Image (cartoon, grey):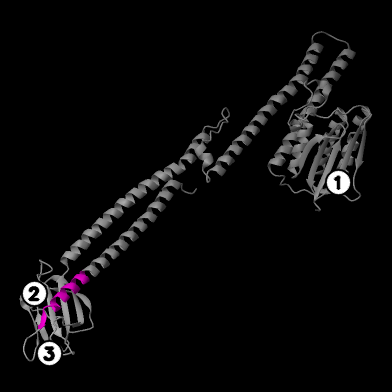
Amino acid sequence: MAAMFSIKRRIVVAVVTTELLLVICLVFLAAFIVRRSSIRSFDTSLRGRAMMLTALVRYSEGAHPELYFDQALLPPQLSESAPDLFRIETGHGRMLASSNSGFSFPEDRQQISWGFSFQGTPYRALRLRNVPVLDTEDSVGPNKETLDVIYASPTKEMSQAMFRAFTSIFAAGVLLLAISVYASVRAIEKGLRPVSELASSASAISASNWNLKVTDSAVNVVEIAPLTHAMSQMVATLHAAFQQQRDFTSNAAHELKTPVAVLKSTLQSLLQEPRSAETYRAGILDALSDLERLETLLHAMLRLSRAEQRAGTGGSRENSDVDVVATCEAAIARLTSIAQSREAVISLAVPDDPLMVQAEPEDLEIVWSNLIENAVRYGPQKSEVRVVAARSNGSVWVTVEDSGPGMAASEIPKVFERFHRGEPSRARETGGYGLGLAIAKAFVECYGGSISAGPNEPRGTRIRVELPSSRG
């Protein structure tokens, strides 16, 4: 047996994992942007400091002016934790000024910016190449000197500022993740609440309570509405089946009660005092008549049970091809004596070619016998019962029509219910037990067909049976 799992837990884990990955990506992206912006700002500051140094490079006075660095106007340090480092050279490589710290910059003139460590302190340096001398002297002429300037400052304050920014971003990300997870969990719980309510309502269903309480939330949620509808239909179907079984038991007991009571009364009357042989014989014949009625009822109930059992399994048993016309003729032959007693005429209209279906011949004969017998019994004396068989659209159709009084519109939906009879009484003279049409319906549905009842023009009742043809 597979281990149980929680849908809620799985959804929460998936949502939390997704949001965690998203927050991590956002934190790293923000940290990258902050670091890049800080380095750019620091490089801009270094460039400004370097340009300030180039402004202190001047030409000396005299007939042959030369470049020199005015140390007296040196600007204050950019950082208080460690000294700034710089070096100024002419374009020809002559040293003009240096920070005199004992540090020598690399001679690779291709480097623009780089980081290094000096006396345990991290630095970042920036190189400016071919910077023109800002001081102007008329005697120098058009070919002025250019300068190469390197300026470096410690990055401790910048690193601390970036660390504070990273910490703030991380704290904001954690807070955002916590808020998002809380909101997601609450939303998931709210979204799954209709399922819990539906399960609680379903658990309350019992033989005495068939009311499935469906909340508005369960109906209005798109994903849960199909489940709600399916469960409502299932409960309604179970209720109908349960009620049908209860009605069947009650009706069967009612039908059995009368012949059993009559049989008991007959036998008791025979035992009360000595009687003649003719009286005993007449009493025994009455008892046998009641027993035959009981036997007929029990056979009908067994047929109905067998048909419904076959229908419940989908009629999965292998069936051979059966000619519907032959089964109709056999059913009519069975009912010859009943038709003669009511002076009724049974006609059969069929096509020339056989109408083949996959079924058991005995079952089909029972179906046609029940339909035709009903038409004969409930039709007027000397009436005609028409049986028509045909093929249409891959199906075989059999119609039984009578010219009786017909049925009220309110009776049509009930005619296939068990123990249902149109007469208000259950007198023995009515004939039958109200099981014939129920048995016919069960057998027809067992073979994948359908049966319906309706009025026959100009008067009477028409019952139509459709079965899938085995030859298309």
Please rate how many residues cluster around mark 2, counting C-alpha atoms within 10 Å: few if below 14, some from 14 to 19, many from 20: few
- Residue 106 visible, this angle: no
Residue 166 % position (x, y): 25, 60
Q: Amino acid at mark 3?
A: Ser
- For the residue marked with disc 1, what is the amino acid? Ala
Q: Horizontal and vertical percent for residue 449?
A: 76, 44
Is 158 situated left or right of 270 in this image?
A: left
The mark nearer the N terminus, 3 or 2, is 2
| Residue marked by disc 3 | 139
Task: Tell me: residue 429, above or below residue 332.
Answer: above
Mark toward the start of the polypeptide (2 vs 1): 2
Residue at coordinates 12% horizontally, 67% vertically from top-left? 79
Question: Do the residues bearing badges 2 and 1 touch, measured as CB atoms within 8 Å?
Answer: no
Instruction: Tell me the residue at 32%/49% (across/down).
Output: 178
Residue at image mark 2: 74
Give the quadrant of residue 58: bottom left
Tell me which residue sits at (88%, 44%) in the image: 325
Q: Is 66 left, or right, of 374 in this rendering?
A: left
Q: Position of residue 384 (x, y in %)?
A: 92, 33
Alpha carbons under labels 2 and 1: distance apart: 117 Å
Residue extent of the magenta highlight:
42-58
| Residue 49 magenta-highlighted | yes
Task: Give the residue pinned by disc 1.
Answer: 390
> In the displayed image of the protein, which residue is found farthest to the top?
273
Q: Is residue 181 left or right of residue 6?
A: left
Q: Which residue is nearer to you in this view: 308 or 234?
A: 234
| Mark 1 vs mark 3, CA separation in Å | 126 Å
Residue at the spot 13% in from the left edge and 69% down from the top edge: 78
